[in-house]
Image: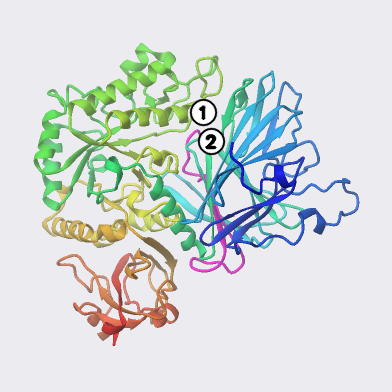
Amino acid sequence: MSTHPQDPLQTGFDYLALHGRDSSLLIEVRPNEAPLWRYWGPRLPDGARPGAPLRDGRPLPSFMLDTDQPLTVCPSFGVGWFGQSALLAHRQGRDFAQAFQRCEVEWRQPGQAVVLHLFDDVARLRLDLSIELQPETDMLTLSSVLTNLGDAVLDIQWLASATLPLPGHSHTVRHYAGQHVHEFIEQDEVLTRSVWKRENRRGRTSHDCFPGAVVLTPGASDDTGVVYGGHLAWSGNHQQFIEWLHDGQYQWQMGEWLAPGEGRLEPGQSWHTPAWVASCSTRGCNGLAANFHAALRARLNWPGGRMRPRPVHLNTWEGFYFDVHPGPVKELASAAAAVGVERFVLDDGWFHGRHHDRAALGDWWPDASKFPQGLGELIAHVNGLGMEFGLWVEPEMVNPDSDLFRAHPQWALQLAGRPLITARNQLVLDIARPEVSDYLFGKISALLAAHPIGYLKWDHNRDLTTAGLADGAPGYRAQVHAAYALMARLRAAHPAVEIESCSGGGGRIDFEVLRHTHRVWTSDCIDALSRVDIQRGFLQFFPPEIMGAHVGTAPAHTTGRTQSMAFRAAVALPGHLGVELDVRQLDAADSAELKAWIAFYKSLRERLHQGQVWRGRGEDGLVWQAHGDAAAQDLLLLVYRTVPTTHRYVPPLRLPMLDAGARYRVTQLLPEGGDPRAGQHGSAPFFEQLRTEQGLALDGAWLAQAGLPMPRALAETAFIVRLQRLDAEVAA
């Protein structure tokens, strides 16, 4: 074990400082106790330190313990801390109180990555808290490992991945609620002296309780002010809370929620928490989003080591549902190729006995009544059209009406004496059993080995209930780790295959599943108007290139609402563009328009999927986002009118991310053949000039402070422009 020159074991008292580009954290290390949190916030100068140890500036109040109990890096129950504890555990009712009495500091990278080795010699525990602050992204990664040094089983009720301090002027917590087909609903709640808490027990990341949040200080907005963000990299049960402390500060904890009996730690064993990724931004919520995007991009494990341009994607689900047969599917593939689709994904309905959602999950071989010659002929047809082939699977599930369940009913997660609870007519397989994982690997790997299948849409269409393992113990945690292991095993055997994480739409979207996957299905709702807000919430944490965004049918299957082809395509444009409709049924005009939008996406995707994303809301029902290179200031601006205007004259749209000292060439962008006046009421010379090749040269300061004029347009229309920074010579 290496130590820093200022290790507290040598000096008896020290501060540990980690610095990012725009943020810092500071920890006070003292003998005979766990280190104390002193600071997490905007960047401090390298040598900045508190003027005195924490307790020296905290006179004790009346009716108080004789020893001050500040917030430590791992507050624990039973020895003087009365707030929420980061660890709750016991050994058959004993050792229920913990206190870490010494700390060894191991610098993995001085000033950037440190491990705090904490020891409780009474409760016979060791906790290793890893803290890393990446200077390039200002992203913190924190996790804990608890080791049972005793001679009896330790039952863990709660072990936070970490505890973080928040300043007393933290004002609002923004979190994301939702449900199937309505994910990422933004919720703002004012922080008070009451504990703010969110818990998820559904066994997957969930639609309704996203494992992350943003904390805003007064005056913070999309583009300005200090904000804090955190996200748990975990695809199962989770909880987080923010608690007001009696010194006026807050503590924030996040970690895995454990089912009763799930956290049993045998003597000598260690318990690893999921990682908590967190960041402090001084540039508002958009600065925070940029930090998260950069961090996730560094984690993604692309085939070949780097992302290639995201191929235009067609999924057959809303075109056929379960009614897939070679003839019509090949016709759809031909129609898809004709409009420019590059990847054709055969969704549910292709495998043995699968004619509806009541049967066949688990029987992963082609249905002989639909594909008597197997999938080879269809795949060859798709490849012959110049498209990749992808396939839908749901490996973690089984229908009671299936050959697999009839042969192995014990393979489903279940509890003795309890009825099997189905959802979507399916049960959950106990994939932590080696024989189950081997079966699934064998079936799926055989398909990937036999055919050039470059893509798997991996679904997970229900919550976990009666989730008992073979021995009756709870299996929520084991199920998540087994899913990761199965994905990793398939990736290792077939490294060129990309995987999409789908879970009834947006039910499994998190940083950890994205170590094994490359795209997420944002929502089963493809209604473009609903998608505006769903995608806005998604982009707070995740970059656009992994955001599955499809042009769906009109009317939309989940809402019954109808939008124009142009609006549907414009909303899908900035994500990983796909199509989810029966292209054969389009008339000539719609087919030509869709083809033009696909070509438009291909011309823009590299700029849309690199660099930063800014999100904002203008006045009068405008929602906007901009994509591009912050340094070069070459940006694509997409503005969506979601409701009819309430103004006689539409207010200009301020663009605060622009360089006030620069000038910009502003041009309106359209797909080939697109009507520049579609959906607009009247026109004006300004907008006519934007439609010319040379556009208009405008001052960045004016656009940032006064704003870019907006056309008067119908609801559910889009306005897309490019803003290219002009150098001084051109501007002159």
In what quadrant of the picture does the N terminus appear? top right
Q: Residue 304 lies in what quarter of the image?
A: top left
> What secondary structure prevails in the magenta region?
loop
Q: Is residue 309 magenta?
A: no
Q: Does residue 547 appear in this view?
A: no
Q: Nearer the viewer, residue 321 or 499?
A: 499
Q: Position of residue 350 (x, y in %)?
A: 23, 29
Residue interval drawn in magenta: 203-229
Which residue bears the numbered disc 1? 476
Q: Nearer the viewer, residue 46 or 210?
A: 46
Give the mark, 2 or 1, whose residue is nearer the N terminus: 2
Q: Nearer the viewer, residue 460 or 422?
A: 460
Residue 138, compared with residue 223, is above or below; it is above
Residue 244, compared with residue 126, is above or below; it is below
Q: Disc 2 residue type?
A: Asn
Q: Are marks 2 and 1 in contact (CB under 8 Å)?
A: yes
Residue 493, compared with residue 18, is above or below; it is above
Residue 42, compared with residue 446, is above or below; it is below
Q: Position of residue 526 (x, y in %)?
A: 33, 50
Which residue bears the numbered disc 2? 237
Report the side of 502 relative to 675 (left or right): right
